[in-house]
Image (cartoon, helix red, strand yellow):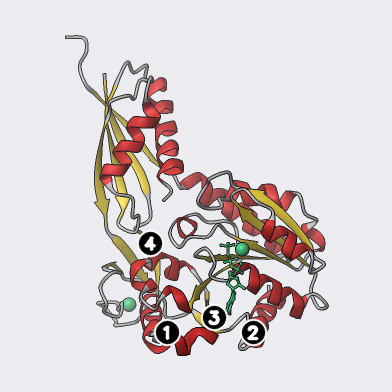
């Protein structure tokens, strides 16, 4: 018989290429002292709102640019550009996450040598972005009160890969059964080192603490 | 969620190796998928069937083995299997430290192909 079944060794991880490129990007950013923040969250959790608030507090002190991953629109990039910083739109064309190649394209289009902080607004979902390294110096995620306090149990990887978590829309707390303490307990079980901030991008409550953390991180790079 | 990019990456690697070995037909693909992936076997197979149509990997069966989430203790270096969906605090079984880093559990590893 000629058509015998053969076993062919492959031994390749599909994430390996991405992880490698992400490491290279990160090293380059460290050399240039440019802090890349990868901001992740569900759709509507308040990513663009937090980016805008952060720019308002920091643009006098740091040179900032923003990379917006949007499936097919320019809405977020336009909002950010209005704040007077460079905003780049990356069309992900249906992709559910940013990978290191897309981030590289975005960074190449910026003058990273002269930037202190680049914020990447990743695609809105709690699953896919967590699996792909972007080259960011730090990862942060936003959980908004209307989404519920059980998300850390449902999407553990997201909470594991982040160094900071922002609980946004705390102005909704009185209207909801969101249990902040329970939520924080879950997250800290998954990731004891994570920094947790409670904010409202609507009222401005808690924004200063978040901004201070980010500023200190950028400065200590 | 990201079945499409994941499966197309897998297929790309499968076809590269199949071509290198002058394969006529890929019969099965053996994968190890980390437990942190929430892609379901059924959907992975459906996307694979769709993307591989008309090529030498058409009709190949995905044989998926789930690999556990493994953590490494930051304090004593011990590695251990973790159940992240469980509500208990993650603790090192050796020294009870709660500090850890993820070693594996998010991989899509292609082990080998069965081919003609
Ligand atoms: N009440 C309240 N509303 C908020 C807060 N932060 C954001 N919003 C509102 O929530 C909606 C979504 O906010 P965005 O900042 O666009 O959220 P996003 O995560 O960037 O959304 P996508 O990019 O579409 O995924 C907007 O209507 C905001 O005004 C908050 O702290 N409190
Ligand atoms: Mg947005
Ligand atoms: Zn230990």
Kindly identify the residue that appears in the image at 60 percent across and 46 percent down: A101
Q: Which numbered disc covers residue B103?
A: 4
Left or right of A38? Residue A150 is left
The residue drawn where x is 44% and y is 66% is A158
Query: Along the line of sight, which residue is nearer the eye, B81 or A191?
Result: A191
Q: Nearer the viewer, residue A184 or B28?
A: A184
| Callout 3 touching callout 4 (CB < 8 Å) | no
Q: CA distance from mark 3 to mark 1?
A: 11 Å
State which image quarter holds ligand 2: bottom right
> Which is more toward the observer, A164 or B113?
A164
Residue B27, image x, y percentages: 25, 25
* Cα distance between the residues tagged 3 and 2: 11 Å
To which quarter of the image does residue A126 belong? Answer: bottom left
Which chain does tag 4 point to? B
| Tag in front: 1 or 4 | 1
Which callout, 3 or 2, points to the residue nearer the camera? 3
Instruction: State which quarter of the image contains the N terminus of chain A.
Output: top left
**Residue in view at x 43 percent, y 48 percent:** B2
Residue at mark 3 shares a chain with residue at mark 4: no
Q: Sequence order check: which comes first, mark 1 or mark 2?
A: 1
Q: Are marks 1 and 4 in contact (CB under 8 Å)?
A: no
Q: Are marks 3 and 2 on the same chain?
A: yes
Q: Chain of mark 2?
A: A
> Which element carries disc 2, helix, strand or loop?
helix
Query: Which residue is labeled 1 in the image?
Result: A176
Label annotation for residue A207: 2
Q: Which residue is mark 3?
A: A169
Separation of marks 3 and 4 at Cα, in angstroms? 34 Å
Residue mark closest to the camera, 2 vs 4: 2
Helix, strand or loop status at disc 4: strand
Which of labels 3 and 1 is toward the front?
1
């Amino acid at each position: 018989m000629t058509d015998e079944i053969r076993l062919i060794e492959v031994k390749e991880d599909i994430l390996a290429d991405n992880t490698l490129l992400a490491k290279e990007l990160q090293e380059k950013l460290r050399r240039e002292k440019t802090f890349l923040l990868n901001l992740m969250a569900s759709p509507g959790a308040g990513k663009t709102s937090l980016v805008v608030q952060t720019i308002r507090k920091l643009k006098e002190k740091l040179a900032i640019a923003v990379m917006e991953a949007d499936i097919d629109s320019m809405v977020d990039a336009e909002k950010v550009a209005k704040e007077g910083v460079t905003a780049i739109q990356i069309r992900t064309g249906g992709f559910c996450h940013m990978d290191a190649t897309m981030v590289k394209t975005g960074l190449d289009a910026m003058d990273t040598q002269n930037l202190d902080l680049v914020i990447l607004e990743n695609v809105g979902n709690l699953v896919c972005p967590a699996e792909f390294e972007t080259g960011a110096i730090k990862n942060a995620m936003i959980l908004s009160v209307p989404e519920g306090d059980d998300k850390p149990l449902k999407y553990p990887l997201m909470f594991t890969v982040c160094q900071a978590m922002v609980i946004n829309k705390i102005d909704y707390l009185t209207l909801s059964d969101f249990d902040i303490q329970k939520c924080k307990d879950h997250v800290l079980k998954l990731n004891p080192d994570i920094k947790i901030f409670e904010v409202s991008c609507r009222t401005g409550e808690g924004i200063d603490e978040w901004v201070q953390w980010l500023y200190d991180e950028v400065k200590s790079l | 969620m990201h079945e499409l990019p994941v499966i197309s990456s897998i297929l790309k690697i499968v076809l590269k190796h199949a071509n290198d070995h002058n394969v006529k037909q890929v019969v099965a693909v053996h994968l190890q998928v980390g437990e942190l992936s929430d892609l379901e076997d059924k959907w992975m197979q459906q996307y694979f069937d769709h993307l591989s149509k008309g090529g030498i990997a058409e009709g190949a069966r995905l044989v998926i083995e789930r690999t556990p989430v493994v953590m490494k203790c930051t304090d004593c270096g011990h590695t251990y299997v973790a159940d992240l969906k469980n509500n208990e605090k993650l603790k090192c079984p050796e020294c009870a430290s709660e500090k850890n880093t993820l070693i594996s559990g998010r991989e899509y590893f292609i082990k080998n192909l069965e081919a003609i």
